Image (cartoon, grey):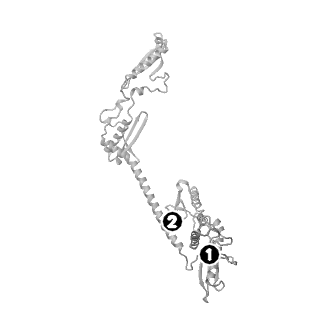
């Protein structure tokens, strides 16, 4: 059936559709050009009304038609179909049947050539094998077909069904702006995301710098005695002593050094410092990962750092399982959540445990020094090592290496950032009391 000319031809390839999902109408463009399908929807609500959406749809259709011209009729007719047996499109072998007056049927084989005339019209020419022979009939059929295709030059396939271009340059410009809008929004979102990430990184760097500066100032300070873990005490009679108190892994190591039995306050302080250094070096150092593995009494999941998030309602079902990364100074806290609706409760809980284990595994080489005094001792050792690095080229056997001896720095404190062994040059006294553990 031929399409009507005029306004109907302007809407060829453009359909009016109602969407039940969006509760609105839109224009849909459907085109097939050289076996390639094109489709695009133009919603009234997004394009500024029905007429504006129609103009944009027609502009896009005209753009596709201009980029993909209609197939010429001779090219379409020259395509070889799957059921072709002659090797030339439109040429076939057939046996014509003729019945005489006595009812006898005679067959006359022939090669047929279908000659297209344009406008969906076709003419068939037969070349009998009995007249021209097998090869002669086939050659004549092929020649007739080629001559018929040559007369189709300049014609296009289904010319009456081709859409008529109605778009103006203004419509094309608005269409191009509409087509660029998603990519421009995408580029803008990426730029904004990069800007937010850079701002966040800058804030984190500033915060970390402030924390490091405050930590550095705090490490330069110490208690009233001037030495970590050592305090000055007096008894009821007014006699003074230096008391050492170190707490590690639930145990307290304490000892007092009286001024009367240690050659005055200076001698007592020297012996207190030596005893403190030996106890501090002999105590085991745990990592941050070991410290955060302890399960707290208020844990609802039976695992540290993993807890459920409940939904609304009377039953309060578990909506997701959340795994938290242990907090570290100067760093942003992280977490991962796993939805119960997506993974199931058991799988979500298992994934949360795995995520928590990955968070904790990153802290295996991070030392756990909760006491400020321990950090002060590390800082003091590092400063002494920097000041004496140029002069201490050789360390004699039997010389104490300050708050950290070689074994302590080489084995237990290898995870503390590679602090080098330092030498103070002070000899250890012959008699030093052993540390006395006291439960506290």
Viewer-nearest residue: 45 or 365: 365
Above or below residue 267? Residue 148 is: above
Is 12 positioned to the left or the right of 102 in the image?
Answer: left
Above or below residue 286? Residue 102 is: above
Viewer-nearest residue: 80 or 435: 435
- Helix, strand or loop at label 2? It is loop
Provide residue 19's location: percent of width, then percent of height. 39, 45
Q: Quadrant of the C terminus?
A: bottom right
In the rendered structure, find residue 246 and report the number of the disc placed on it: 1
Is 399 positioned to the left or the right of 4 in the image?
Answer: right
Residue located beneath label 2 in the image: 330
* Residue with the most extreme bottom position: 237
Provide residue 133's location: percent of width, then percent of height. 48, 12
Residue 71: quarter of image: top left
Provide residue 426's location: percent of width, then percent of height. 64, 75
Gap between marks 2 and 1 measured at Cα: 27 Å
């Amino acid at each position: 059936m031929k399409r009507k000319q005029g306004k109907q031809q302007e809407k060829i390839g453009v359909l009016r559709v109602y969407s039940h999902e969006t509760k609105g109408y839109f224009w849909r463009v459907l085109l097939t050009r050289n076996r390639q399908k094109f489709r695009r929807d133009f919603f009234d609500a997004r394009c500024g009304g029905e007429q504006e959406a129609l103009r944009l749809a027609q502009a896009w259709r005209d753009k596709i038609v201009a980029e993909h011209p209609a197939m010429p009729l001779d090219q379409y007719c020259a395509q070889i179909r799957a059921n072709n047996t002659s090797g030339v499109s439109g040429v076939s072998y057939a046996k014509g049947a003729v019945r005489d007056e006595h009812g006898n049927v005679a067959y006359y084989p022939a090669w047929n050539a279908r000659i297209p005339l344009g406008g969906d019209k076709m003419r068939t020419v037969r070349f009998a094998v009995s007249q021209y022979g097998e090869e002669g009939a086939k050659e004549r059929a092929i020649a007739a077909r080629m001559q018929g295709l040559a007369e189709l030059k300049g014609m296009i396939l289904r010319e009456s069904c081709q859409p008529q271009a109605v778009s103006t340059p203004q419509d094309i410009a608005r269409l191009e702006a509409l087509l660029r809008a998603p990519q421009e929004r995408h580029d803008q979102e990426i730029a904004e995301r990069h800007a937010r990430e850079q701002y966040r990184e800058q804030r984190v760097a500033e915060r970390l710098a402030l924390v490091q500066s405050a930590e550095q100032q705090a490490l330069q300070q110490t208690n009233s005695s001037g030495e970590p873990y050592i305090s000055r005490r007096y008894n009821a009679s007014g006699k003074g002593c230096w008391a050492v108190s170190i707490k590690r892994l639930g145990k307290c190591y304490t000892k007092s050094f009286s001024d009367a039995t240690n050659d005055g306050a200076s001698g007592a302080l020297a012996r207190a410092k030596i005893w403190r250094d030996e106890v501090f070096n002999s105590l085991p150092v745990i990592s941050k990962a070991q410290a955060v593995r302890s399960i707290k009494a208020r844990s609802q999941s039976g695992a540290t750092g993993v807890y459920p998030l409940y939904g609304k309602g009377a039953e309060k079902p578990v909506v997701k399982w959340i795994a938290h990364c242990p907090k570290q100074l100067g760093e942003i806290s992280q977490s991962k959540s796993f939805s119960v609706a997506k993974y199931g409760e058991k799988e979500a809980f298992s994934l949360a445990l795995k995520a928590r284990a990955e968070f904790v595994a990153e802290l295996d080489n991070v030392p756990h020094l909760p006491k400020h005094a321990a950090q002060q001792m590390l800082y003091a050792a590092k400063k002494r090592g920097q000041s004496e690095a140029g002069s201490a080229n050789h360390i004699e056997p039997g010389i104490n290496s300050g708050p950290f001896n070689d074994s302590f720095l080489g084995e237990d404190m290898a995870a503390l950032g590679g602090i080098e062994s330092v030498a103070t040059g002070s000899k250890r006294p012959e008699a030093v009391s052993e540390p006395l553990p006291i439960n506290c």
